[in-house]
Image: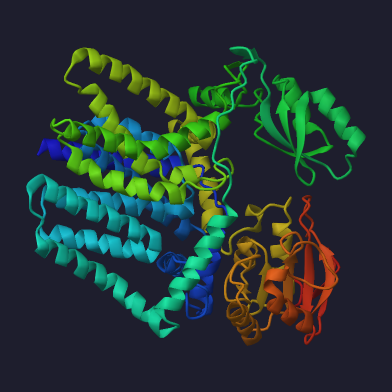
Amino acid sequence: MRRRLLPAVLACAVAVGAFGYRFLSAELTDDDYQFLAIGRQVQEFGEWPLRDLVEEGDPLHNVASAALLGVFGYRLAGEVFFDLALLALAAAVAFLVARDVSGSIAVSLAAVALGVLMSPRLYDYPKAVFPMLGLWGCLRYIHRPTAMHAAILGALTGVAFLFRHDLGFYLGVAASVTWVSLKLATGTAPLGTVRAYVIALALFVVPYLAYVQVLGGIPAYAAASQRFIEREVGRSDDPLPTFAFDLSRPALERSPGFPVKIRWAASADESMRVERERRYQLADGTQDDGRTWNYKLRDHRFENIRAIVNDPQIEDTANIDRTDPATAGHSLVDRLRRTLRTPPSVAVAPGVLSRNNGIAWLYYLFMALPYVVLAICVLPVLRRQPAPDSWMRIAPVVGLSAIAGPFWLRGNMYENSRLADLALPSAVLGAWLLAMAFRHRRPAIRNVLAVCAVAIFIATTGAVAAFANVRRGVDDSLAVLNRKVLSEEIDRQMAWLLASPPPLSLLSTATGMRGAAEYLQRCTAPSDRVFVYGFYPEVLFFSGRASAADRAVVLRGFWTRDAEQRRTIAALSKGPAPLALIDVETAGGASPDRFLDPTLAILDTYLSQHYREAGTTGFGGSSNLTFRVLVDRRRMPTGTYEPLSLPCFAAAG
């Protein structure tokens, strides 16, 4: 009983720790807002995936967001708490799976801790929780191959398919590997249990496929999904991560540059900026977005940092500790947090131990792990030696990771969180390998393997810290050691989570998103729809306006077939939008002959016939983003939005 109770208690502790670690630093991205915008379109405006909205292969994910908005209202709390809870559940189940395959609680905790620190984005919770639940189902079936356990695995596969179609495929692969492994190990594979799996899977999948067939047909749906996947993969088909070593740099480098961001005031001209860069030792400046620049801060003294913060020519800063030590607390927590926020005075092997190399290390480690484990299991058999006792339990993890890795780890690893998507399956594989290294029969070989395993684990820990900005996460988490600070942090988080409508202060002023949402709130009625061209779902969600198109995000190169464009036009005609916002860069530049890029020629013709240009604006942002504002020719403005001199179609409040 105690042997079963301890892992369960520790799994609960992992879940609580994972939830708390992410809650105190929770943030939402554009992709999160895409699901929220679609969810609100379903919940508030009664439009459903496939029937009214383009479906991109994750129907239940959108419906789940709609349900959360229905329960919690027009606020962010429901989505954030739900996402965090499922990410925490994924970590807890990963610990149980790792402990089952490795037999070691300590190794499993260490490996899963790294997976938690990788911090997958909130909207990616299906990628975290369903592979882990599916692998847990595989292990339950291996321990007891009954029809009940097979049905549970089938149900998990079906629900995963509805959240993301590819997840259903990956769990199907894991289930198939489980049956093959059981057949190889025991010589039997109960057909009754396979039938139970298929029946449970069908109970979830068949109703949705019938829905698809009624609304357009399964072949057309599959073809459209394939085109979407090809376009999405092609858009992020970037070179693989590469190692870059600068051996000319010393092993220890004093006063290394610390990455910071500076947003200069509108009044700061180039000569003034150059003078301030020299004064504050802001080196290697590169323009990030509009008036925002990236630098390496060479002078870490408090006096210099305070001067930067107080400079009237500097509008805002990022990655700079703005706390004044003279007024800050002196408790242990305060000192620890200030230490974390203080740039290091010495860098160790900066030409080798870089974030670039850390990301490359994680990429190739995650891609190699399933094949290394497979080799360790298969090579003894080829030599007519017994395979590791746990080979049958680790086999489903190998199958899932080997299939999912190439699909998930694509594109630019340096600017997104895709590595975090494969963190938990890789943590399970890593736990198994660590346990194997510590348990080799021959002491001499065991010692060598143990040293190598520890070295790899340390290198991986450093890579995770560089990839996931662990300094900030740990800084936020230290609030739990101070009751007053913790209370303040919780109040701060809950304030924006529970606000209804969600506060516009969450949107960036630099990109103009806050200005765009405020304009739509002031100058359109709640029942109005808006056409937005470009990846800006946050504008729709925060403004509370529905998309006039058949999807929340209209982008270049997606859904470009004639029939698909006509479907978008039908949606536009059904609920005419008084305003359309066109991102000039996404459209391929501002052309007097067209509003959209050439891939959407039919849709562009419709806009040209029914809309006229009312102005061009960045909505008060400091970036280079520019939007063409189009107005419906058939509607007369009721006034002018003075801050931007744009037409209004509702009384400005």
Residue drawn at the location 62% of the way across and 76% of the way down: 549
Q: Is residue 505 left or right of residue 638?
A: left
Q: Is residue 284 above or below residue 449?
A: below
- Where is residue 486? Give x, y as percent: 48, 38
The N terminus sits in image quarter: top left
Q: Position of residue 219 (x, y in %)?
A: 42, 77
Residue found farthest to the front: 383
State whether residue 119 is above or below residue 233: above
Position of the C terminus by quadrant: bottom right
The answer to whether residue 108 of the structure is visible from this angle is: no
Query: What count of labels does the image hold?
Result: 0
Examine the image and state in which quarter residue 160 appears. bottom left
**Residue drawn at (44%, 65%) of the image:** 58
Q: Quadrant of residue 480?
A: top left
Evaluate whether residue 472 shows in this view.
yes
Against 248, residue 153 (above or below) is: below
State the scheme by which the image is colored: rainbow
Residue under the image location 40 percent in, 85 percent down: 214
Q: Nearer the viewer, residue 599 or 67?
A: 599
Where residue 145 sits in the image (x, y, percent)?
11, 54
Q: Is residue 557 left or right of residue 489?
A: right
Q: In terms of depth relative to the viewer, which is nearer, 477 or 566? A: 566
Horizontally, is 653 left or right of 165 in the view?
right
Q: Residue at x 76, y 56 (%)?
A: 625
Out of 228 and 386, give the one closest to the viewer: 386
- The quadrant where residue 167 appears: bottom left
